[in-house]
Amino acid sequence: MVSRKDDSLQSISVQLDGKNYTYWSYVMKNFLRGKTLWSYVTGVRIKPTDETATNYANLVDSWEADNSKIITWINNSVTHSIGVQLAKYETAKEVWDHLARLYTQSNFAKQYQLETDIRALQQNDMNVQEFYAAMTNLWDHLALTESAELRIFEPYLARREEQRLVQFLMALRNDFEGLRGTILHHFPLPSVDSVVNELLAEEIRLKSKADKGSVTPTTLSVFAAPRQSPPSNQNRPPPKVSSDECAFCKEKGH
């Protein structure tokens, strides 16, 4: 049986909200396996019923303690509204089976939804790192729908990496059009991770360029040459006297 030294009730960091069951169940299954308690969920380890067995009372106490601990871990990793639904169940297996019935979709349905979300995702106002994290999250969920055979089939993994690269590049902002065109002509095609490194450097370069090129109207007015006002009448030269006028009487003709 499990050592009673492990009394921590802290569960996994992923919280089941009804939309992420595939990932949540994956993390929780591995968590319980690490505690050597997964057999309680599968029903392999059931509550002792043979009252004539040696140390029967201790066996029952130990089983109930582990069973209650698993239920508590599960309750601590789901939203309140989901946790309320679990109160009617007594065993960890019943709790797990209920959640599986409620949230398990066919692989095709999950794949369809994830593929749709991937195609709809655009970088928009996200920086490169934020966009990469959002896209990676969808890719990881989609990978969970793949069969075990596909996950070790090298040609499929290579094709999947190319597809991810295309999806990522297509969803980038037009700011990266130049770099995108260059990457598409690489042979062999780079990995998504190496492309992200290039994009991060390009993002810094574009930001620096934008900061240097941002000149406000006020700044422009400082460097603009001052306008010169037309000369005043006092500075104008005296009008020329016609050669036909008399210098004394100002009459013409003599």
Image (cartoon, rainbow, N blue to C red):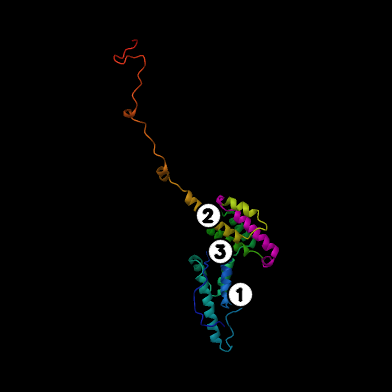
Give the residue type that dot 1 points to. Thr
Q: Which residues are magenta?
A: 148-175
**Residue 20, numbered label:** 3
Q: Quadrant of residue 220?
A: top left
Residue 182 in the image: state x and y as whole percent. 62, 53
Q: Where 165 sits versus 92, above or below? A: above
Instruction: Please tell me how crowded label 1 is: few (under 14), some (14-19), or many (20+) other residues with Cα within 10 Å.
Output: some
- Of tags 3 and 2, the one toward the viewer is 2
Q: Residue at x 58, y 58 (%)?
A: 198
For the residues labelled 3 and 2, the Cα–Cα distance comes to: 37 Å
| Dot 1 and dot 2 residues touching (CB under 8 Å) | no
Mark 1 lies on a secondary structure that is helix
**Residue 42, numbered label:** 1
Position of the N terminus by quadrant:
bottom right
For the residues labelled 1 and 2, the Cα–Cα distance comes to: 54 Å
Residue 77 in the image: state x and y as whole percent. 51, 69
Q: Earlier in the sequence, mark 3 or mark 2?
A: 3
Name, please, the residue furthest toward the left. Answer: 249
Q: Where 5 sits versus 154, above or below? A: below
Per the image, is 170 magenta?
Answer: yes
**Residue 205, numbered label:** 2
Instruction: Please tell me how crowded label 3 is: few (under 14), some (14-19), or many (20+) other residues with Cα within 10 Å.
Output: some
Name, please, the residue furthest toward the top. Answer: 253
Per the image, is 215 magenta?
Answer: no
Mark 2 lies on a secondary structure that is helix
Mark 3 lies on a secondary structure that is loop
